[in-house]
Image (spheres, grey):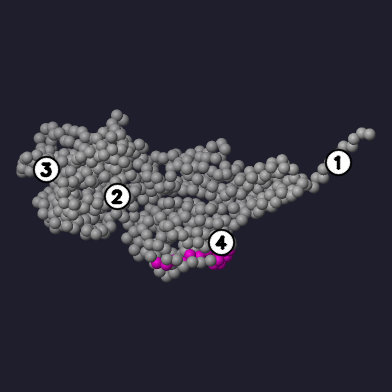
Amino acid sequence: MRPTRPAPAPSAPHAPHRLVWLAWLAWLVVPILGLAAAPSSALSQLDFEALAVFDDPSLADLGPFSFGPSAVVDEATLGTLVGFDVPGDVPAGSLATSGQQGVVNLFSPALTIDLASPVNGVALSLVALRGQALLIEALGAGGGVLASLDVLPPLGASGFPSDRFQLDAAGIEALRIQAGGESTSFFLDDIEIVPEPAPALLLAVAGIGLAGLRGASPRRARAVALLLGAGLWLGCVPDSVTITSPVDGVVLFEPTVQVEVAFLPPLRPGERVEATWVRGIDSVDDPLVIEDASADLAVDILGQSGVLPISGVAPGRNSVSIKRFPAGGGPATAFDTVTLDRGGFFPDTDGPFENAGVIQDQLTLASQLDGSDRTIDLVVWYPSDEPGLPGFPLFGLVDAPVADGVASLPVLLFSHGSCGIPAQTPFLTASLARAGWIVVAMSHPPNVFSADCAEIANLTISFVERPADVSGSLDWLLDRNVDPSSPLFGLVDPQRVGVSGHSFGGMTALRVPPLDPRFRATLPLAPEYDSVATLIPLPLSVPIMIQGGEIDTVTPFATDQIPVFDLSERPRFLVELLGTGHAAFSNFCFAPELCPEGLVRQYAYGFLGRYVAADRRWASLIAPAPGVVLTADP
């Protein structure tokens, strides 16, 4: 009797596997075809920051945040930058970008933010600039209020809030923040959202349950689970865009950078990527420019990563935003933004560099009196990452290598006082180098430290020669800036040059700008003026900050600094350091209570950063402080 062949197994148990296959395939194919976009693709975090100003009469006091008429952004541009819509017209004189640097000045009773997809929860952080209460509302379809909070944000002066406020409700489609009838200002940062459950995710979970029914073989169940996991990863993980390099807020000292970005999951066929570059956010010189850099973004063949080269990074903050759009159109499903900060940090005693390098050299100039040769000693400070203890009296490492990657830095020329030396004020000159500047100090023979330096003949010769000494030193520096064999090659931005000096050098700093238009601002420290008032061409055509000591008997504040301020044009600043004398502006000040180096540096940095380095944020350092009488007329 022939054996009978076993009957085929019933097909019913395979049905669950077919359902799983269909669930996975549907979610994989639907996004590719661009026919649907599940809410699970909504962002888990919106990297957004806004400075919202509600009818705030003190806007003028926000110095660094007064952007002027060049910063005009319309509603469409705002939506493009931040990845969601801000209804209503954005008024002239306001600025909007996304990410760490983003600022919105809205003169309206409420700030409304429309989300790309409904969400179940929103957490946001606020920091107030004025301290008034705010009403935060979560809005649903039709603008109905789903949840609300009355909050008093913590008071602060920067856009890095830490307190978080959360609203939970199903179907949140927008946020509204308002201050009622009060005037207020606040920063809004990093809106975190909880997306609604995605239909595809629910379908996949149902598929898992079906796959567990009895009748499925272990081997086939494992295969289905593997495919299901791949489907979940491709379809149910939110789309993301991550700029991996440079890090957000990086300080750059050269005008070029390469931006690297990663996409997860990899870009699907038909998906579109946009790159937006915003430059000149803080730059005094450059108008705000919003540029579509999408054509320069090179994405690899697998759609996993991309590279965007950027050149022409303006002083202050710039931003790069990269957004991802679904194949079928619609709002961005993900984006990321980084701030590129070209040399714009708020300094303290030390800058971001490990040390100041020092070069000593000599320069031969023709005398302004008789054409004979004059030998000028030069001391140049520059940023260096070389470790080590800075030497005395230069407060830097001689011939240390230049810090990696620095280029096109702002420059200060420094003129010493009568009978002084080039390295008389390293607490300012060397510190500026650690902050990313090139500083050049020159000697003024025969009025340098010597037994006869104060003789009338030597004082007279120095008075005549000093402006040419400063301009000749700048010529020397610019020559080396274009010499590939020089360690200073490429380090100088010739458009950002200022001059400073102490006492006789402060007088020199008053005389140089009218004779040499390359100097865009002047910082005279305790300048002598009264004795030579008829020889100083005031007012100057460049910004000026005069610093002086209250008890200075060498160049008294009332006769040598106040008249200079009174005869100067805007922008002009007068800083009186209380209880200090003439030596407070050099390292030859030996009584600590009379030597407020930190205050001298603070106001010098604020002024030079704003008016020479062309980064308006530094102006925030020009603020009243204990021990100072500040007169500001910007």
The tag earlier along the polypeptide, 3 or 2, is 2
Q: CA distance from mark 1 to mark 3?
A: 112 Å
* Magenta stretch contains residue 583: no
Which residue is depicted at the point 21% across and 46% down?
500
User: Is the residue marked by circle 4 packed among few (<14), some (14-19), or many (20+) residues within 10 Å?
Assistant: many
In this view of the protein, can residue 77 be seen by the observer? no
Residue occupied by mark 2:
348
C-alpha distance separating marks 3 and 2: 30 Å
Gap in angstroms between the C-alphas marked 2 and 1: 86 Å
Single out the mark in the foreground, 3 or 2.
2
Disc 2 crowd rating (10 Å Cα; few below 14, some 14-19, many 20+) is: few
Where is residue 314 drawn, in percent x and y?
37, 45
Q: Kindly identify which numbered label has been placed on residue 419.
A: 3
Q: CA distance from mark 2 to mark 4?
A: 44 Å
For the residue pair 454 and 541, the one nearer the viewer reads as 454
At horizontal 34% and vertical 48% (from top left) the residue drawn is 345
Cβ atoms at labels 3 and 4 below 8 Å apart? no
Q: Quadrant of the C terminus?
A: bottom left
Q: Which residue is mark 4?
A: 172
Q: Amino acid at mark 3?
A: Cys
Q: CA distance from mark 1 to mark 4?
A: 57 Å
Q: Of the residues shown, which amino acid type is indicated by label 1?
A: Ala
Q: CA distance from mark 3 to mark 4?
A: 72 Å
Indicate the secondary structure of the residue bearing disc 2. Answer: loop
Whether residue 602 is visible, yes or no, is: yes
Tell me the residue that label 1 is attached to: 7
Label 1 crowd (10 A; few <14 / some 14-19 / many >=20): few
The range drawn in magenta is 132-146
